[in-house]
């Protein structure tokens, strides 16, 4: 598969998942509204989730930088890193992002910012110490691709969609158990039970769709990053090194893990945690990159 074909394939799959997400929300919304005899539930859930999620979106970069304890640097602090970022930004046609460093021994990196004008690239001290220049270029290109692809905006939209479903279900359950019944209590009890089970499992299904979108964005960033450097093997080698090092990350947590180029969690991961990982397996990403180099 060519670099362009790989990128286009992941874009199509992302939009397919998003469309499925929207259809899923409409279906759940209709089911809850019908079941509770109250379309107001849907409107309240949508307004609440959109308001909270977009408010957090405007300040997400500042929140994340505080959580990971990253510190800003200037060009004089690390000229080589800055030159790599500058050159790749020129190639990608992106504004120069702010550059931050985390005092972590584990090699890793991520990008944030609500749009290219507010982009931020964060790398760990371990990444700078362990990677060769071509490998570091691959990682930076991957992170700039997230900025160029507006992944922060897309992820915020996905969070909104998940929030809508979770809020709808929460409001519905409160109304049902504390508000007293619904029109379907007098109908077929089997259909009512099936509807209730579907509603309760809806947040779980929404999370799975969210993860599918997130994983496709990682493949897309890999392909787009390889297009920037024209050297897929550089990123493939970087992913191998990063994933092979068992150094734990002190600030690793579920709220920020999805941002990193490779999951910051190390050691044995149980099957349930693996199911909810936001990253595709590193081995699959490396194979895809190596196929692009052929």
Image: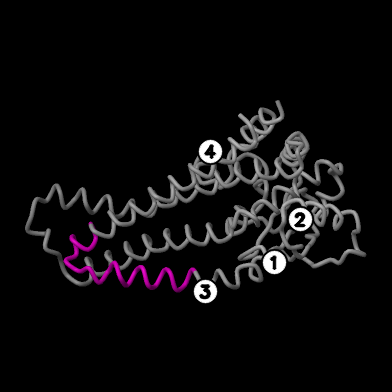
- Distance of mark 2 from mark 3, alpha carbons? 28 Å
Please provide percent x and percent y for residue 259: 63, 54
Q: CA distance from mark 4 to mark 1?
A: 32 Å
Residue at (91% x, 58% y) in the render:
79
Disc nearest the viewer among 1 and 3: 3
Instruction: From the viewer's side, name the closer residue of 141 and 261.
Output: 141
| Residue hosting label 4 | 9
Residue at image mark 1? 65
Of circles 1 and 2, which is in front? Answer: 2
Of the two numbered discs 1 and 2 on the same chain, state the one appearing first in sequence: 1
Confirm whether the magenta stretch covers residue 9.
Answer: no
The residue that label 2 is drawn on is: 89
Q: CA distance from mark 1 to mark 3?
A: 17 Å
Q: Residue at x 60, y 44 (%)?
A: 220
Residue 8 % position (x, y): 55, 40
Q: Are marks 1 and 2 in contact (CB under 8 Å)?
A: no
Q: Point out the tag, 1 or 3, that comes first from the N-terminus.
A: 3
- Viewer-nearest of discs 4 and 1: 4
Which residue is under mark 3?
Answer: 55
Q: Secondary structure at mark 2?
A: helix
Q: Tell which circle, 2 or 4, labels the residue nearer the N-terminal end.
A: 4
């Amino acid at each position: 598969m060519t670099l362009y074909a790989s990128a286009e394939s992941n874009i199509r799959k992302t939009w397919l998942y998003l469309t499925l997400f929207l259809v899923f929300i409409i279906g759940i919304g209709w089911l809850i509204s019908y079941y509770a005899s109250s379309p107001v539930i849907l409107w309240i859930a949508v307004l609440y989730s959109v308001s909270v999620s977009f408010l957090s979106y405007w300040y997400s970069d500042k929140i994340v930088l505080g959580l990971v304890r990253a510190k800003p640097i200037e060009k004089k602090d690390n000229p080589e890193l800055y030159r790599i970022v500058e050159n790749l930004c020129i190639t990608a046609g992106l504004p120069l992002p702010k550059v931050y460093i985390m005092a972590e021994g584990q090699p890793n990196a991520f990008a944030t910012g609500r749009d290219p004008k507010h982009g931020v690239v964060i790398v760990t001290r371990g990444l700078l110490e362990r990677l060769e220049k071509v490998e570091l270029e691959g990682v930076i290109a991957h992170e700039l691709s997230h900025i160029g692809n507006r992944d922060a905006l897309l992820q915020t939209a996905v969070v909104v969609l998940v929030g809508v479903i979770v809020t709808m279900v929460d409001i519905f359950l409160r109304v049902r158990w504390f508000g007293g019944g619904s029109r379907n209590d007098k109908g077929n009890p089997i259909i009512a039970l099936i509807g209730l089970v579907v509603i309760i499992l809806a947040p779980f299904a929404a999370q799975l769709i969210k993860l599918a979108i997130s994983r496709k964005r990682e493949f897309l960033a890999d392909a787009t990053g390889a297009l920037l450097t024209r050297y897929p093997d550089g990123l493939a080698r970087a992913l191998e090194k990063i994933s092979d090092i068992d150094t734990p990350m002190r600030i690793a947590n579920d709220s920020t893990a999805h941002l990193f180029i490779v999951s910051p969690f190390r050691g044995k991961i149980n099957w349930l945690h693996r199911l909810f990982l936001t990253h595709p397996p590193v081995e699959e990403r490396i194979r895809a990159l190596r196929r692009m180099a052929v």
